[in-house]
């Protein structure tokens, strides 16, 4: 597939549109007539789709293009195809017949395909000719027209009179945009970047192409670590700006004002906008489809019709004019607005429009920006609040978003140790302020790689007010668990509750701590109950500590991961991503979501997807030690090891060891699960089993039963039964059995049964476990269990059953995107000749041997002999088993 790296702007890959391409291909294969009208808005790739379809058809082609300049010239679009011009006295019917005859030599004995581009701009004579050709039926037509009522009557008659079917082309889907971007850039494109570009362009191929070209040329779209990603503001200059401005057309001063207020204020209530602009101009802009109105509840919200319109309007607005627009918006919204985020919008507009903003307004804006996880905006407003004299309140508002954005090195200057006499002031004796101060410092220390717990212990000892003390103890409970001190976390939960009814923030912290502990202990049902109860009180605590909401979502997803419900875990990650938002810019939070998607993909056996997601996550991490480094880099090492890429696996594991924070033990424990597989990829299977058992012991020490379970089972998958001393494999099976009794969900018992079956090499039990893994969506685990069953059957002298299990293992492994594990090392593709496969499919479809023989013109004995060979090679006994296995092989 072509890419843009050669610098040629005209080279752009074709992707997606599979159904549309097939439809056009079918219409071009019709014996008489044939063809299609492709209609759609500009920039959707109508011409490129037509070109691809015609190229695949392999037929002789002629092309004409309608233009505004040629619309006044009869047959102007066809002029280049005429060998000579007939006399005007011949009238219209003679030219139609004459041009039709003139086209025949171009077909070379085949039926010509005539491509008519921009048919809505054809002159009336050319349009009549196209209609004439469609009515004759000896020329295949691909007619490309804009959407709307501007086409000549003769062109509109093509679909209105059912001469040609009309294909209304819609925008690219997000998945199709991803395919186009991957082909254009020649490599993997970060999922967040795909979503952002798709949202901005709304699936318009032309806009997507120009944004990519501009992004690459300005280096805001660049590749690092094998991943293409967008960093920075959108450059709306050059060709992008030209395209948008051509869509906007000529605007009066009043119309331009409508678009500017809509762009800077989007979304803006219609009644507020009506108070800012002329009502006639507002209605004209709506009629021209340059602004859109959408209902949200009882309100009508106005915004530019395309995200790119807003970007270009804001970019081309001069600084003085932009300040005036923002100042006026701030005045109107502050006086009359009632949206939840109006205070944030007003704070930003006040800051942008100059003057001396009220520090309280900026502090509130900082808090609300962090509620929306917009780290960069929260930091900007918080710093402005400090500069405006906001003091300690501004420092406290700024502290958490600052450290969550990677700025923990500034924490000491922002929130020094109480009593140090720093410029931000001492929190003094106010217990509530002291509690808030201590919690902010503790979070910062944790993300900065230092022990946060002494700060909280000192504050708890110094604070006398019970509710303020609860706030500190609840924060300590949560951070104790993250630091791997389960008993201390449990103790602090009890201490907090012993002081009476907790404040909303303390209750939410306790819920996050308890839900996370329950998830890792395998008590999924109780975890989900705690999360649901905390979310019912969301409005009472979210603004005080927004980071607790992702923590609760994370607890929910881990409960599902350990229970074996991977679809629900995937949906929990999606919930987290929706909370954070693609434009928020909280890179650490985004990285965590990518890392969890990598983890779930790996468990599903989608190893290529796991690599892509974990690379995306690793690319979002700030430099140095940071939260989620163990998750993202550990999953990257794990997935790379499963594909056999030892170099990348070791590099990622080394980076994880260097960058994982001690205080993120529970979140980043996946790095310990990666270590055994990196050893195995390098050929050290005995060391891999030992590393898996060591990881299980560390997980048990820190109360992480879910990871203990996975580590123990990894030892089984790596061959613990043959690579450990006597009694170790039995201990593994016993530990998994105990965990299955203590944990919720269908997965723990399946892992225990697989371990027990592997220990005694029970092929039937191994096959049963494989089917249960497949039902859970864990295809790689299922493939390995089938491979174990194949070995057990061979040991017992059952070659046919062994081949059946081996074929099942191969079929599943083929869907695991390049996975290579010790259990699958000896698998080979089941070999069938072309004739055997043909007969096998007919038999699986229900045909008798006689029917197959008649269809293939062979003897019944030949059919029977081939089927015997098929049964022998695949290890099945009848047509039912054959149908099931062939279906698996074909779909894999």
Image: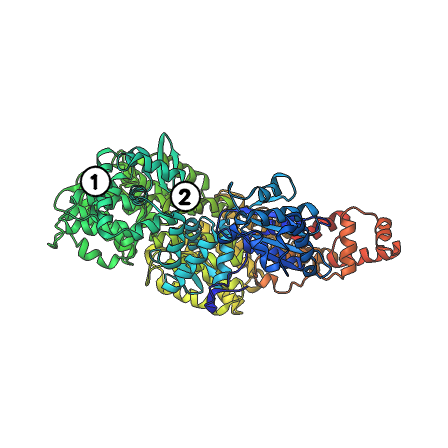
**Residue 702 shows in this picture:** no
* Element type where label 2 sits in the image: helix
Q: How many marks?
A: 2
List x then y, in percent, for residue 42.
Answer: 48, 50
Q: In terms of sequence position, does the residue under pointer 1 or pointer 2 come before the other?
A: 1
Q: 880 left or right of 1?
A: right
Q: CA distance from mark 1 to mark 2?
A: 26 Å
The N terminus lies in which quarter of the figure?
bottom right
Vertically, is 336 above or below 685?
above
Residue 331 to residue 413: above or below: above
- Residue 640, how many percent across, how many down? 49, 63
In the rendered image, the residue lying farthest to the front is: 89
Q: Give the quarter of the image for residue 500.
A: top left
Q: Residues within 10 Å of mark 1 (few under 14, many from 20)?
A: many
Q: Nearer the viewer, residue 728 or 202?
A: 202
Q: Which residue is mark 2?
A: 518
User: Percent x, y for residue 601?
Assistant: 50, 53
Q: Quadrant of the C terminus?
A: bottom right
Is 110 in front, or is 174?
110
Query: Is 146 situated left or right of 851 in this image?
Result: left
Residue 413 visible in the picture: yes
In the picture, measured across the screen, residue 645 lies left or right of residue 93, that is left
Q: Circle 1 is placed at which residue position?
A: 468
């Amino acid at each position: 597939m072509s890419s843009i790296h050669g610098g040629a702007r005209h080279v752009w890959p074709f992707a997606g549109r599979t159904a549309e391409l097939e439809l056009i291909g079918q219409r071009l294969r019709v014996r008489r007539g044939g063809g299609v009208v492709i209609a759609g808005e500009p920039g959707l790739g109508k011409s490129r789709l037509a070109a691809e379809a015609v190229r695949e058809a392999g037929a002789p082609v002629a092309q004409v293009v309608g233009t505004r300049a040629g619309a006044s010239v009869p047959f102007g679009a066809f002029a280049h195809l005429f060998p000579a011009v007939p006399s005007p006295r011949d009238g219209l019917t003679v030219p139609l017949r004459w041009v039709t005859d003139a086209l025949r030599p171009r077909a070379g004995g085949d039926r010509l395909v005539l491509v008519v581009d921009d048919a809505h701009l054809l002159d009336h004579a050319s349009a009549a000719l196209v209609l004439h050709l469609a009515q004759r039926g000896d020329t295949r037509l691909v007619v490309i027209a804009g959407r709307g009522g501007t086409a000549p009557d003769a062109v509109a008659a093509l679909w209105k009179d059912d001469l040609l079917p009309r294909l209304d082309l819609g925008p690219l889907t997000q998945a199709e945009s991803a395919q186009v971007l991957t082909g254009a850039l020649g490599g993997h494109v970060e999922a967040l970047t795909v979503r952002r570009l798709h949202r901005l362009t709304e699936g318009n191929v032309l806009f997507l192409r120009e944004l990519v070209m501009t992004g690459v040329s300005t280096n805001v779209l660049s590749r690092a670590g094998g991943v293409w990603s967008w960093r920075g503001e959108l450059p709306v200059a050059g060709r992008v700006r030209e395209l948008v401005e051509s869509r906007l057309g000529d605007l009066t001063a009043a119309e331009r004002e409508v678009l500017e207020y809509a762009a800077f204020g989007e979304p803006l209530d219609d009644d507020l906008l009506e108070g800012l602009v002329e009502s006639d101009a507002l209605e004209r802009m709506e009629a021209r489809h340059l602004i859109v109105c959408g209902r949200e509840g009882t309100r009508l919200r106005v915004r530019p019709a395309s995200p790119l319109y807003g970007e270009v309007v804001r970019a081309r607005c001069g600084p003085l004019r932009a300040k005036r627009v923002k100042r006026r918006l701030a005045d109107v919204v502050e006086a009359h607005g009632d949206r939840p985020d109006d205070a944030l919008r007003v704070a930003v507009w006040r800051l942008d429009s100059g003057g001396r903003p009220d520090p309280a307004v900026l502090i509130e804006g900082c808090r609300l920006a962090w509620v929306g996880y917009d780290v960069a905006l929260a930091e900007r407003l918080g710093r402005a609040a400090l500069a405006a004299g906001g003091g300690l309140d501004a420092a406290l508002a700024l502290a958490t978003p600052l450290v969550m954005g990677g700025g923990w090195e500034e924490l000491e200057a922002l929130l020094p140790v109480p009593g140090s006499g720093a410029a931000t002031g001492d929190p003094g004796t106010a217990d509530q302020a002291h509690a808030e101060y201590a919690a902010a410092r503790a979070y910062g220390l944790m993300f900065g790689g230092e022990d946060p717990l002494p700060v909280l212990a000192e504050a708890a000892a110094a604070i006398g007010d019970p509710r303020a003390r609860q706030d500190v103890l609840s924060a300590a409970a949560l951070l104790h668990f993250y630091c791997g001190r389960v008993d201390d976390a449990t103790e602090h939960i009890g201490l907090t509750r012993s002081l009476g009814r907790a404040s909303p923030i303390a209750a939410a912290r306790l819920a996050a701590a308890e839900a996370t502990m329950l998830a890792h202990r395998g008590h999924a049902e109780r975890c989900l109950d705690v999360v649901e109860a905390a979310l019912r009180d969301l409005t009472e605590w979210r603004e005080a500590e927004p980071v607790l909401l992702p923590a609760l979502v994370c607890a929910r997803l881990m409960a599902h991961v350990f229970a074996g419900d991977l679809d629900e875990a995937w949906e929990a990650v999606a919930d987290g991503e929706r909370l954070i938002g693609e434009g928020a810019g909280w890179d650490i939070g985004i990285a965590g979501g990518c890392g969890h998607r990598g983890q779930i993909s790996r468990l599903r056996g989608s190893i290529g997807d796991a690599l892509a997601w974990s690379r995306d996550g690793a690319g979002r991490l700030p430099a140095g030690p940071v939260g989620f480094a163990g998750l993202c880099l550990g999953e990257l090492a794990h997935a790379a090891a499963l594909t056999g890429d030892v170099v990348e696996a070791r590099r990622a594991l080394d980076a994880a060891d260097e960058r994982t924070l001690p205080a993120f033990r529970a979140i980043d424990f996946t790095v310990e699960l990666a270590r055994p597989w990196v050893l195995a990829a390098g050929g050290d299977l005995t060391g891999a089993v030992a590393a898996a058992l060591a990881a299980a012991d560390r997980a048990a020490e820190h109360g992480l039963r879910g990871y203990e379970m996975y580590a123990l089972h990894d030892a089984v998958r790596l061959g613990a039964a043959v690579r450990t001393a006597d009694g170790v494999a039995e201990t593994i099976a016993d530990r998994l059995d105990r965990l299955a009794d203590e944990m919720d969900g269908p997965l723990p018992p399946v892992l225990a049964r697989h371990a027990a079956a592997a220990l005694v090499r029970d092929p039937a039990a191994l096959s049963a476990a494989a089917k249960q893994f497949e039902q859970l969506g864990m295809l790689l685990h299922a493939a390995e269990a089938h491979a174990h069953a194949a070995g057990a059957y061979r040991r017992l002298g059952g070659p046919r059953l062994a081949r059946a299990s081996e074929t099942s293992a191969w079929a599943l492994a083929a869907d695991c995107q390049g996975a290579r594990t010790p259990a699958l090392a000896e698998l080979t593709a089941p070999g069938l000749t072309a004739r055997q496969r043909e007969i096998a499919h007919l038999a699986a479809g229900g045909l008798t041997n006689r029917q197959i023989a008649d269809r293939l013109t062979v003897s019944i004995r030949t059919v029977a002999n081939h089927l015997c060979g098929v049964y022998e090679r695949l290890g099945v006994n009848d047509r039912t088993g054959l149908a099931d296995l062939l279906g698996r092989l074909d779909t894999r």
